[in-house]
Amino acid sequence: MNKKRAISPIIATVLLIGIVISIAIVVYMWQAGFITEQISKFNGPIEAQCSAINFDWSFKQTDALGGELSINNRGNVPISQVNIKVVNKGTAITKNFNQSAIMPGATLSDILISTENFTNYEPGVEMELTPLIAGKGVKTGNTKLFACENSAIKKTIG
């Protein structure tokens, strides 16, 4: 007679609970990478501050290799950094410009933009500036930047 023994129901239940908990931890860690921390500014969501951004910029081409950029913050929210996107000959290049914050009412001028940063300029080149504002992470309290895409200004230069 062949005597086979199976595992007891208690051990099987403990193993199943352990497997379910392990899977739940893996799923939680996986989905946590998709959720970003909420950023606040002036005790509210940072997205609300993007509508208060009012800025303008101008570009004066000094030679074939580039020119000078001037940014005027006419709003009441400090602009921490600016993303500069240049579209030339169908190629888009984006660089982050973080020389210094542009306070409300201030103008940052004589910013040299050269071929080292982008590419040779030709007539019809498009330049787009997107302001970034700083806020605090709600959970961590760390300073984080938020790009206000709806406040971006695109112009044709050259």
Image (cartoon, rainbow, N blue to C red):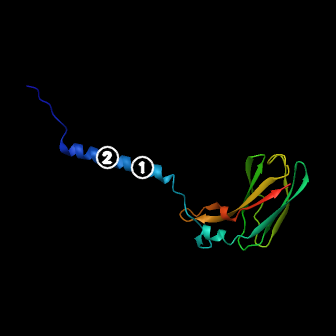
Quadrant containing the N terminus in the rendered view:
top left
Amino acid marked by disc 2: Gly
Please state the horizontal and vertical placement of residue 39, each as a whole percent of the image: 58, 64
The residue shown at (55%, 60%) is: 37
Query: In the picture provided, is 59 more to the left or to the right than 91?
Result: right
| Front: mark 1 or 2 | 1
| Occupied quadrant, residue 62 | bottom right
- Identity of the residue furthest to the top in this view: 1
| Relative to 33, residue 49 above or below | below
x, y percent for residue 42: 62, 73
- Residue nearer the viewer, 81 or 140: 81
Residue at point 70% right, 71% down? 77
Q: Nearer the viewer, residue 126 or 10?
A: 126
- Which residue is depicted at the point 34% across and 49% down? 21
Q: Residue at x 88, y 48 (%)?
A: 65
Please identify the quarter of the rendering in which residue 142 is found. bottom right
Residue annotated with mark 1? 27
For the residue pair 98 and 88, the one nearer the viewer reads as: 88
Placement of the C terminus among the 4 image quadrants: bottom right
Secondary element at image label 1: helix
Q: Amino acid at mark 1?
A: Val
Identify residue for label 2. 18
Question: What crowding class fits label 2: few (fewer than 14 Cα within 10 Å), some (14-19), or many (20 or more)?
Answer: few
Q: Quadrant of residue 48?
A: bottom right
Residue 45 as seen in the image, left or right of residue 89? left
Q: CA distance from mark 1 to mark 2?
A: 14 Å
Work out whether mark 1 precedes mark 2 in sequence or the reverse, and give the earlier one.
2
Q: Secondary structure at mark 2?
A: helix
Q: Position of residue 120 (x, y in %)?
A: 84, 46
